[in-house]
Amino acid sequence: MANTLTLDEADAQEHFFEQGWTDGLPVVPPTIDRVQAMLAGGWVEADEIIGAVPERNKEVTAELAAINAVMAGCRPEYFPFVIAGLQAVLDPAFNANAAVTSTGGAALCTIVSGPGAAAIGMNAKHNAMGSGNRPNATIGRALRLVAANVLDAKVGKMDGSSFGHPGKYSFCFAEDVPPEGWTTLREDFGYELGDTTVTVFASEGPRQIANHLTEDGDELCRTIASAARLPATFSVGKGCQGVAVIGPEHRLGMVESGMSKQDVRDRILELSRIHPDELAAAGVHLEVGAGHPMIPGEDGLLDTFSSPEALLVTVAGGHGAGWSSYIAPWAPTKHSRITTRRVREEGDSLPECGPGGCELPADFFSRLQTKD
Amino acid sequence: MATITVYEPTGPTIDLGALKYATRGELEDGLDVTLVNNGKPRAKELLQFLGEELKKDLPIRSVDVFSKTSAGKPLTGDEAKVIAARSHLVITGVGD
């Protein structure tokens, strides 16, 4: 059980700042009543284990998750989403040990797909990646607070981010309803349309994609690919994953150009390959004899993405002049993979997770969403 | 003044118990040393240089550099066993 302490109510906020338990913003004091209500919202017992990071001898209990979710400002009905997000972060394929520590400074980018997102009032439209929506802001913040407080991912301890970025406070949004004929993110991962899933991605901040003057699907893919193949990005030419979030005008243009979601993904994938000369022109050297063998294909180009499935295509954003977003990875796929978990419903059991990793029921692995 | 009772948000580190040191024995022919390369660019060259420098000051018979496949992941158990079997001394570190 977590330790408790009794504080003068007026001093509680300052005490949490002094202990280094916040992300720099005020938190909701995790009183016993609030934490019990959070646990009830997730249908879990306090001592149930959500997952572990064996490399640093740390495990995340439901109680610790609930404490940090209260501090983040979550309502109890958000807690199943926080649990699913933490289970995804603690999947060994995500490699939380490195993702929350690296000098590259990754966000725990969190994408919620499914009817549950709307049910708790998540935002998938205008300013979906920005401020102003409580579940978007607090679910993402809860994951980060757990990383900081439970996994010690703090500057001076186990967060070596050279710069970091604002997404490290919170980076969580919902997927919008895709155009007819396009699949949802959860379906892409093999879940049912009626399921709700949480996908996590160790990422840079989002790159806004502007193209206001064309409705041509191929031109729009070119614009997005130009953001995905920036030579200054660590993972370009090394085989990574990425997320293209297509805005309303752009996806309309793509659909009216006859492009399926698969067509969009394949075209961006193709256009994102890069010649070593382009990297050299930007002053970027090829890694030789190191962990990332940058060996061009027969056509002389390096792959930016590690496999055809490595680029996720999803939809969000509000109507405007014609915007989309590309979310670049923190590192190549060999270091960290996008992971997904289904949001449990009342009556569903919590998959078992022990300190040796996520010791999940055998049938759970068939739903584990890392395809490459 | 009103008081509230709150939880601390930090978790314990799992106690793995006492660690056992490797057996110390007599060396007749010098040390076989393995330096673990984290896979970052130029790390291998740096470690090879350091290995040569160590040879000048210590009774070292051989220096080997083992390269990890990912800087973001620890050695596997099998890799660690192979290294332990062939080395008297293993040196690792963290760096960019």
Image (cartoon, coloured by chain):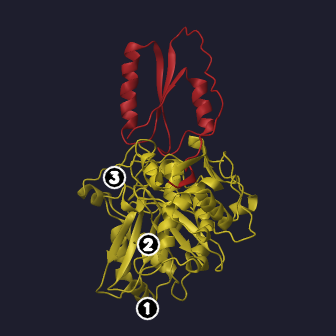
Chain colours: A yellow, B red
Camera sees residue A22:
no
**Mark 3 or 2, nearer chain start:** 3
Q: CA distance from mark 3 to mark 1?
A: 41 Å
Q: Quadrant of residue A270?
A: bottom left
Amino acid under disc 2? Ala
* Left or right: where A54 falls relative to A138: right
Residue B14 point in image, percent of width and height: 63, 39
Q: Which mark is residue A256?
A: 1
Which residue is found at the position 25% from the left and 53% from the top? Answer: A283
Quarter of the C terminus of chain A within the rendering = bottom right
Disc 1 chain ID: A
Which residue is denoted by mark 3 in the rendering? A163
Amino acid under disc 1? Glu
Q: Which mark is residue A244?
A: 2
* Left or right: where B9 falls relative to A23: right
**Mark 3 or 1, nearer chain start:** 3
| Circle nearer the viewer, 3 or 2 | 3
